[in-house]
Amino acid sequence: MIAKIKDIFADVSKEMKKVSWPTRQQLKESTLVVLGTCASVTFFVWVVDLIMAFVIKRLIF
C-alpha cells in the first residue's frame, strides 16, 4: 500500500516537471484578460437588468 502511494507521488513529480509553466508576463496578461472579460460581462448583465427592471415596472404600473 505504501509503495503504491510512493509510486503515485513519484509519477506526479515526473508529470509536474513536464508542465509548461507560464512566464510572469504571460500570467499578468492572462489575468488582465480574465478581469477585463469579467468586468465586461458584469457591466452587460447590469445594463440588461436595468432595462428589464424599467420595462417590467412600466408594464405593471
Image (tube, grey):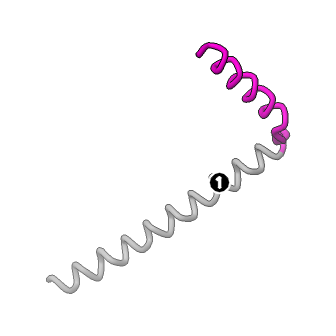
Residue 47 position (above or below residue 28):
below
Q: Choose top left, top right, bottom left or bottom right for residue 24.
A: top right
* Image position, residue 42 (x, y; %): 50, 61
Mark 1: amino acid: Val
Q: Main secondary structure of the magenta part?
A: helix
Magenta highlight on residue 21 = yes
How dense is the environment of label 1, judged by Cα within 10 Å: few (below 14), some, or many (20 and up)?
A: few
Which is nearer the eye, 7 or 23? Answer: 7
* 34 relative to 21 in the view: left or right: left
- Quarter of the figure that contains the C terminus: bottom left
Magenta highlight on residue 8 = yes
* Image position, residue 43 (x, y; %): 50, 64
Q: Residue at x 75, y 22 (%)?
A: 10
User: Magenta residues?
Assistant: 1-25
Q: Residue 24, can we see it?
A: no
Q: Residue at x 82, y 46 (%)?
A: 26
Q: Which residue is mark 1?
A: 34
* 26 relative to 9 in the view: left or right: right
Q: Residue at x 29, y 82 (%)?
A: 55
Which is nearer the eye, 26 or 45? Answer: 26
Which is nearer the eye, 24 or 61? Answer: 24
Q: Choose top left, top right, bottom left or bottom right for residue 22.
A: top right
Residue 2 position (above or below residue 39):
above
- Quarter of the figure that contains the N terminus: top right
* Residue projecting furthest to the left: 61
